[in-house]
Image: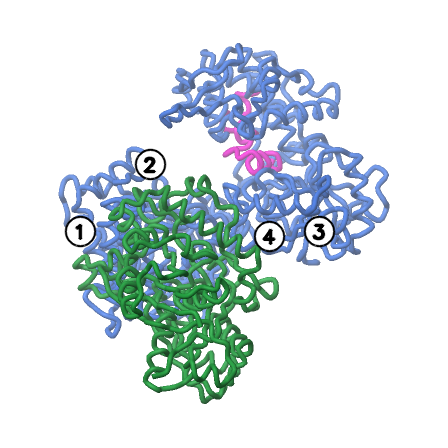
Chain colours: A blue, B green
Amino acid sequence: MADIKKAAVIGAGVMGAGIAAHLTNAGVEVILFDIVPKDAKNRNAIAEGAIAKLMKVEPAAFMSKYNAKLMTAANTEDHLGLLGDCDWIIEAVIERIDIKQDLYKKIDANRKKGSIVSSNTSTIPLKDLTGGMAASLVPNFMITHFFNPPRYMRLLEVVISDKTRKDAVDQIKQFGDVRLGKGVIVCNDTPGFIANRIGTYWMQCGVVEAINLGLTVEEADAIGSRPFGIPKTGLFGLIDLVGLDLMPHVANSMQSRLTKTDDYQRIHGQPAVITEMLKNGWIGRKGPSGFYKMTKSPDGKRSKESINLKTSTYGPSTKAVLESLEASKKGGLKALVEHPDRGGQYAWKIASQGLAYTASLVPEIASTIVDIDEAMKDGYGWDVGPFETIDKMGAAWFAEKLTKAGTAVPPLLKLAAEKGGFYRVDGGKLQYLTTSGSYVDVPRAPGVLKLADIKRAGKPIIKNPSAQVWDIGDGVLCFEFASKMNALDPLTFAAYKDTLKLFKTNTQYKALVIYNEGPNFCVGANIGLALFAANIAVWGEIESMIEDGQKTYLALKQAPFPVVSAPLGMALGGGCEILLHSDAIVAHAETYIGLVEVGVGVIPGWGGCKEMLLRAKADKRLPGGPMPAVAKAFEMIGTAQVSKSAFEAKEMGFLRAKDGITMNRDQVLADAKAKALELVNGYQPPKDAVISLPGATGVAALKLALSGFVATGKATPHDVTVSLALANVLTGGKTNHTETVTEKDLLKLERKAFMDLMHTSATLARIEHMLDTGKPLRN
Amino acid sequence: MSNVVIAGYARSPFTLANKGALKKLRPDDMTAAVVKALVARTKINPDHIEDLALGCAFPEAEQGLNVARNIIFLAGLPNSIAGDTINRFCGSSMQAIHQAAGAIKMGAGEAFICAGIESMSRVMMGGFNPMPNPILINAGHAAYMGMGETAENLAKKYNISRVEQEVFAVESHKRATAAQAAGKFKDEIVPVPGEGGMIDADGCIRPETTPETLAGLKPAFNEKGTVTAGTSSPLTDGASAVIVCSEEYAAKNGLIPLARILSIAVSGCAPEIMGIGPVLSSQKALKRAGLKLDQIDIIELNEAFSAQSLAVVKELGVDLKKTNIDGGALALGHPLGATGARITGKAAALLKREKKKYALATQCIGGGQGIATVLEAM
């Protein structure tokens, strides 16, 4: 299959620029086009401005700041000839068919043979776009619909016609999957494709019913979010995020393109409150306010207001307090929709209309329910797809409740009710219901290995409440954190030790992968446990917990088999330390790594200081001499630096040059397993490291740097205490650069510094504050 | 005894470190280009040159080893010229001039190249391996105190307000902008290769600087302080060089002297107020020249910081009208080791251009020192 090395994105708006940035994340060179502004001196001003904006946008569009260098700004009057070098040309201009069709003519005149052209349209059907299109372009044309922001939203909807080249479709599917890390879903050529078809209905329904039932926006967003597994921004919050100004456009396009009998037509319409808000320019976060409004009083206090859906005026936001919400915490969505209060009624209105509507759309918009569930999860950030949600309540129960309420039950839901659900597990395999009534294995794309699938089919080899070990085949075991939020505690270490023993007695096991399916790899140790131990002054317990962790991590590092860590999401504190002790790391591109212990007033105590130092010492990008490696580790740990991507983690030195980065999270485990097997042959565990460090002179240098932070107000008094403890560890204690220290010397220093800090009340205050508020205390 | 003269002055453009057009240029290449051009412009016979004395504040990495010797090779000068690298921090290349002057007075050579080098992009302040003495650090000694902090100390001691500092900085940019627009740096600048081709103009000057823009900046060194990035000289890349020779040698060999060196001095002061250093060194040099400050027509006072410069102005009684008439380091930049040769060469050139009699070039030095040179028109 041809590779995509160079691409063009035409249209440097938010979506076009974001798509272009994400293409550079995949290592592709991109030419970003836009029109020439009227009377412009700089004819590339729009595209250049978009690139400049991309470099500042939060959350970051680029996975590495160097990626901007892969992007070239161009304009559609002077530079269309550059399309001749591009393997993939993405059109992301305004949603006007005349403009698009005119552009396609120009693209076709300039593109090279074999290149693929796609549109990022969200509203115009493929059949309309290709109407009157040159026969030379039609087989090379498709819709590739990204979601905003393109780096972070995982869904890529692809729409093709029967005239589209099959190899072009395969190429985009493969590239989207492996290189862009997307969940690629081929949808039918129907209005809104999958996610926006359901999403638009859902939002319209949510707004209309909230008004009908007299809910506040806070109540509607509390009900319409977490209980449904929908992000906590809720529906009104989401509209604020997307922009109210886009709503009429999307709604009207949907209404005009959907058939007269589509249920959307029934609920379509612009509520008075939205008309009023649009008139006032209250278009959401892009404007001064939306359904929510952040205000700042003269004394700098921020407060939140929200709109009254009846009067269209703002008032102070109040937290939703509803009995139904409380009921849902125990009884889930089912308890919520059964509750008689207005929250329960609202939930039922959304569920009954939204879920039933969704169930009526297969096979119209997608060939399987899996595609729909995946699309809503990847495109709208839902934790569970609509069919999974129905299964949670029970398909039969739901269908019956619909019937009782006088609502028509779609045939597919009726079928699921009869068969016992949309999904089932058979022979350890997850299966889904087809429209013909049979169950078929949920397909997995090539290169995908899911721990969830392995877990469904088997039993763990080692299991305690904090960790489990699974056989993932070919002699490779997978160590999975299993405690609440994957926090590390003594049981995690017990499981590590059991794993080490297991390898000793079972020679069929060759390598270990440390991995879990998140959402976060591990955000560190259970600090509540540490605080409890300190409060009852069992200092010996704390110290032995530290020493035990140090020994275990060192044993894993020096074990006679390769250990590969495979993080996704956050890998912080103790979670980062295990990465640093691994032979190799295969990280998902969206991995956020850091040693953040100073935030709770301690330093990494399980070998993290030592390992960060060893990494810095081995980092050839740093200058030589006694100080640079020490200063680097001091900066990384002392200021709790966290990478904003795996690529950045490599630049920062958490990942080594040889460590792998996988764009698609579903392929991380397979890649990590392959890496582990690659290391098996001739594997030699690392020996005790011996390094030279600057000792007291190094502390003096770091103190000097620290004094600047104090003067500029960047370091608090306890920051100084913690930093000095850290400086003493990283400089090697009583040594100087003509002598050497061993790993064990450093571990001893680390332990002592950790314990000294645990004895300070300021550290305990930091831990307590973190546990109470989730935020670091600046004392 | 022979008189010592300055018979030529040249420098590279001064550009912002880390973001300017010269950040990728090796400092030894930059200095070699300046030295080579100076030799060509003055038409001095290289075989007559005794030594290349080169000032550098952080003689490490690309400006490490004895970089002066390598610059002789890079500039294609004869092997017969010796080379030495001198460190008196910011006073380094003025010290190079003093050293040459002393040697000429000793009869130990007739002609010298005195140059300065500093790429603050490529060798950061403090160097790659800062290893301060723990005895001094733990005693809280100011030996290693950051320069910004010393400026804050002077602002406090001399009661110099933030506004005064900003007015001074705006004036520096105004003068530098006017001089640049009038082409007054053309003669002294040697174009060197940088990003986007040959760079022939200074890059630190901000013509748009106003009291309002400066007022918006946060304090850079102390959260409660008054010194900002706008009232500090920027980190800069640059090189400079002068020809120092005996008056007889210049006359005999057709060199056109810019000015005669009347006297030189160095002095020490408390490190925490290092910026006051020029006061004592200037007083010593003036006394040695038999002159009073009010006889001086041209003053080049290095502007490390507004607060530091204004403290010297107050203490010494300097007339700002005569001082840094083409702008100072706040606008032009301060490539540490290269500044001394720039301000001495500039003072000599200004005497000639402005047809004045006496000039003083002086600067402060980290660790608590001052250095000064008094010049006389020829």
Between discs 4 and 2, the one toward the N terminus: 4
Q: Which residue is mark 4?
A: A24
Badge 3 density bin: few <14, some 14–19, many ≥20, Cα 10 Å: many
Residue bearing mark 1: A756
Per the model, the C-alpha gap separating discs 3 and 2 is: 44 Å
Is the C terminus of chain B in the top left, top right, bottom left or bottom right quadrant?
bottom left
Residue of label 3: A88
Q: Label 4 is found on which chain of the structure? A: A
Mark 2 → mark 1, Cα distance in angstroms = 24 Å
The label nearer to you, 4 versus 2, is 4
**Same-subunit check for callouts 2 and 1:** yes
Q: Between disc 3 and disc 2, whose residue precedes?
A: 3
What amino acid is at disc 4? Thr
Q: Is residue B119 left or right of residue A273?
A: left
> Is residue B32 found left or right of B270 in the rendered image?
right
**Which of pointers 3 and 4 lies earlier in the amino acid sequence?**
4
Q: Residue at x 41, y 53 (%)?
A: A514
Query: Which residue in the protein does label 2 denote?
Result: A774
Residue in the foreground of this view, choosing between A641 and A517: A641
Same chain for mark 4 and mark 1? The answer is yes
